Amino acid sequence: MQHVHLAYQLSETKAQKGSLTNPLMAILKAVSEQGSILAASKALKLSYRHVWGELKRWEKELHQPLLNWERGQAAQLTAFGQRLLFADAQAKARLAAQLEALQAELERGMALAFDPAAHVIPIQASHDEALSRLRSHVVNAKLHLDISFTGSVEALRALNDGRCMVAGFHTRWDARQSRHAQAAYKSLLTPGVHKILGFVRRSQGLMLAPGNPHKVNSLQDIAQRSLRYVNRPVGTGTRLLLDDLLCEARINKNQINGYRKSEPSHQAAALAIASSQADAALGIEAAARAQGLDFIALAQERYALVCHRQALATPAVQLLAKQLRSQAWHRELAQIPGYAPLESGKVLRMTQALPWWDF
């Protein structure tokens, strides 16, 4: 049995978010994509001799062939090599939120060691690509977002329990359409006690295999053809969104093949489709594009940040709001597929963003 050892390193250069690298997996991925050891070595900026030697060394170490070595033929991973590469990608996708949180916690600790005056905001939030980018974006402003990704419902509970200063959750653009979200969130949010901080607007829809081989256009197609669906866990905003869409389409959740099968993040759901483990999932456009999937938009969402009213006056939250209003952040946000600023950094009344209360 092979054992896994984890390590980290310090560097002044910005790291890839939630990165966990392994030299062998990088070589296998490059060979798979480039089709030859020579092209892979160039892509990795390593010598052919080094890459070839590492492959032979690992074959001996693992007691399994990694490549089909045939002269004159494009290099191909063996079945074992493919399974190894997939296992690595799947684990990283499923652990993406935890890896990002671990990286952020280490960076926060190191930042405070170098600068005790740095601002830290503990955040619990629904997993979101823009929030991950924001964490890296604000570091130079001496602001550190200590983010733990969880479901929207759990994030709001954590805020009310005092386990975080800010929570992140999402609803449909017209929140009045979010019947399931209203039922889940309303008791956790109180006008006058909580305040909304505008963040982003994002697109959610069906993530499908490249070329849309099953010719899916709607949730009805998935139900009628019994296509393999992968859901998000109970308590996540995306699952609440799916339940709303199913109700509107008059589809019983039991008609969805895989309704009870879940993946912990948009990235993990997208990888399940890219690796032919599933046919469809509801997710953000950014996750679909990252895996080269087709995407059919079904809903526009408000992803918002929320805190207690008293927290708005703290220097840390004031600095966060300033960063959200900056043109530099808006330019970075424009690079993420399916995202746009939405009253970013503006303090909103609860009844303004979520018109569920009638006084």
Image (spheres, rainbow, N blue to C red):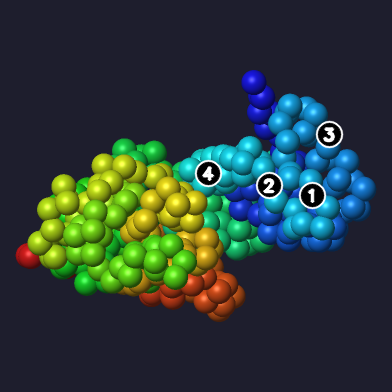
Residue bearing the label numbered 4: 90
Q: Residue at x 61, y 58 (%)?
A: 136
| Foreground label between 1 and 2 | 1
- The kind of residue on which mark 3 rests is Arg
Q: Earlier in the sequence, mark 1 or mark 4?
A: 1
Task: Pick whichever, 86 or 146, lies toward us.
Answer: 86
How many angstroms separate mark 1 from mark 2 (CA)?
Answer: 12 Å
Task: Pick whichever, 77 or 30, lies toward us.
Answer: 77
Q: Residue at x 61, y 53 (%)?
A: 17
Residue bearing the label numbered 3: 57
Whether tag 1 and tag 2 are in contact, CB under 8 A, the answer is no
Q: Which mark is residue 77?
A: 2
Residue bearing the label numbered 1: 70
Q: Earlier in the sequence, mark 3 or mark 4?
A: 3
Secondary structure at numbered mark 2: strand
Whether tag 4 and tag 2 are in contact, CB under 8 A, the answer is no
84 up-or-down from 337: above or below: above
